[in-house]
Image: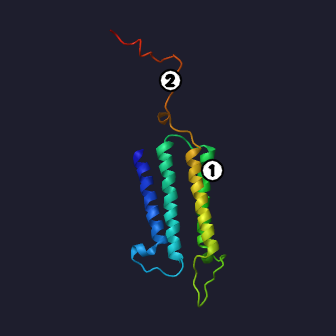
Amino acid sequence: MPRVAQFGIALGALGIVLTLMGLFPGVTGMEPTRGIGITQTSAILIGFLLLILGALIYVKFTFYVYKPANLAQQIGVRLALTGLLFAAMSGYADMLGFGSHERTATTDIFLGNLQAIGLIGSFAIASLGVLVYAITGELRADTIADPPSDGAGSKDLTNSQET
């Protein structure tokens, strides 16, 4: 299943590009405005969603292809998705009505300091979930080198030469 793992890499790369476009809109040719608005926040969130999903797909189809996920790996997936949900909640807090910046006639909705802290913390939680998924599973049998046994089935190479 190397094609699926390659799809995970492509999805992660697309996520990185989209996140960078959201963080630095001048790269796309758009004029950067003061603050980070809803469109930039959406681009950052969608990019990081694609990055996390690409990482989960890559790890699954590179290391644990035919293995069912154990409990720790399921917790890692849920932790990653919970981190993404918290990131969306903190990023869209003003739009959803529980943020500290309300839209008035003179001000607009923008990403504040507490929202940025929540966003970065949630991204860290999602990344930790991917890491938990990656390190808690049992590797495939063909990736683990079998040590030679104590003589049951191993040949002595010095005595097997014919002269």
Question: Identity of the amino acid at label 1?
Answer: Ile
Q: Residue furthest bottom?
A: 105
Res 99 → quadrant = bottom right
The x and y percentages for residue 145 are 49, 31
Q: Residue at horizontal 41%, vertical 73%?
A: 27
Whether residue 100 is visible: yes
The x and y percentages for residue 12 are 46, 57
The x and y percentages for residue 160 are 39, 12
Which residue is tagged 2? 148
- Classed neighbour count for the residue bearing mark 1: other residues with Cα under 10 Å, few (<14), some (14–19), many (≥20): some
| Residue in front for this viewpoint, 153 or 92 | 153
Instruction: Name the side, left or right, on which 146 lies relative to 118.
Output: left
Residue 48 against residue 64 in the figure, above or below: below
Question: Identity of the amino acid at label 2?
Answer: Pro
Closer to the N terminus: mark 1 or mark 2? 1
Res 101 → quadrant = bottom right
**Element carrying mark 2:** loop
Q: Which mark, by number, is residue 112?
A: none
